[in-house]
Each structure stands twice: as C-alpha cells, then as structure tokens.
Amino acid sequence: MSLKADESTFEAEVLGSPVPVLVHFWAPWCGVCRLVEPLLLSLQDEWLGNCRLVDVNADENLKLANQYRLKSLPTLLLFQNGELCHRIEGIASRDDLTTAFARHLDSFGPNLFGFQPSIQIHPYTEA
C-alpha cells in the first residue's frame, strides 16, 4: 500500500523521510498512471520497507506539480535524504517503466536501499 501525500504533508512524508522515497505523481484521468500503479506496488513489496512509495495527485497539488516541473504523467521522482536523485517521465506503457527502472536501478548502486538489490523487473503479461 502506498502513502498519499499532498502539499501540506509532502515535506514530512517525502523530504523528511529516513528512507528513500519514490513519489508517483498521477491524475485520475491518466490511464497510464493506473497501468503502472500495480507494478509500483509490487516493487514496493520487494523493497521490504527500505523504500517507501508515495502517491501525489498532480491535479489536486498544482504547487508541487509546478515546483517539480512536471511535463507528463505519470512522473516518478526518487528522493534520498530529502534530495531529488532520479526522475522518470515519459512513460507510455509498463514496458517503458520496467526499462526505465532497470536503467535507474543500475545507477543507484548496490547500497541505495541498504541491501543488495534482488529486484527482477519483468514485463506485464496477461494471464
């Protein structure tokens, strides 16, 4: 389960977090946002509490959307120690997201989450 944040709680939930935070900027009208959410939740389960997932509704939090210069939705921002480390945008499908995560996870290094990453990202397939 992901946390919800807004302009009043963003500083405490994201910038003040002792663990890295992946912020998922989304909107209710965004179909791709709904497609990537299950994948994000499964990744959070694999992180075992070493990273938190926070959802921010961009439509209801325009100040944050402008502050982080969102160009498209969904946009994913990774914060560590209150600093923006990585940005993933322009996601059009689950495959785009898995490719972006694979590239960014390699750049995080083995100790970003305090453990050796064992995350395997596989494209979504219908059962």
Image (cartoon, grey):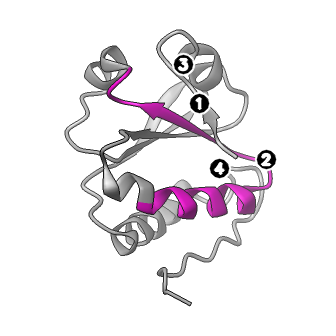
The magenta segment: 35-60
Work out how far the residue at label 2 is from the one at label 4, CA to CA, in angstroms. Answer: 13 Å
Q: Amino acid at mark 3?
A: Phe
Residue named by callout 4: 112
In the rendered structure, the answer to whether residue 123 lies left or right of residue 15 reads left
How far apart in space, not on screen, are marks 3 and 4 (Cα)?
A: 21 Å
- Residue 28, above or below 90: above
Q: Earlier in the sequence, mark 2 or mark 1?
A: 1
* Tag 3 secondary structure: helix
Is the C-beta separation of discs 4 and 1 under 8 Å?
no
Report the residue marked by disc 1.
4
Labelled disc at residue 10: 3
Q: Residues within 10 Å of mark 3 (few under 14, many from 20)?
A: some
Q: Secondary structure at mark 2?
A: loop
Q: Earlier in the sequence, mark 3 or mark 4?
A: 3
Q: Nearer the viewer, residue 29 or 46?
A: 29
In this view, the mark in front (2 or 4): 2
Q: Write down the residue under mark 2.
A: 49
Q: Position of residue 31 (x, y in %)?
A: 33, 56
Q: Quadrant of residue 58?
A: top left
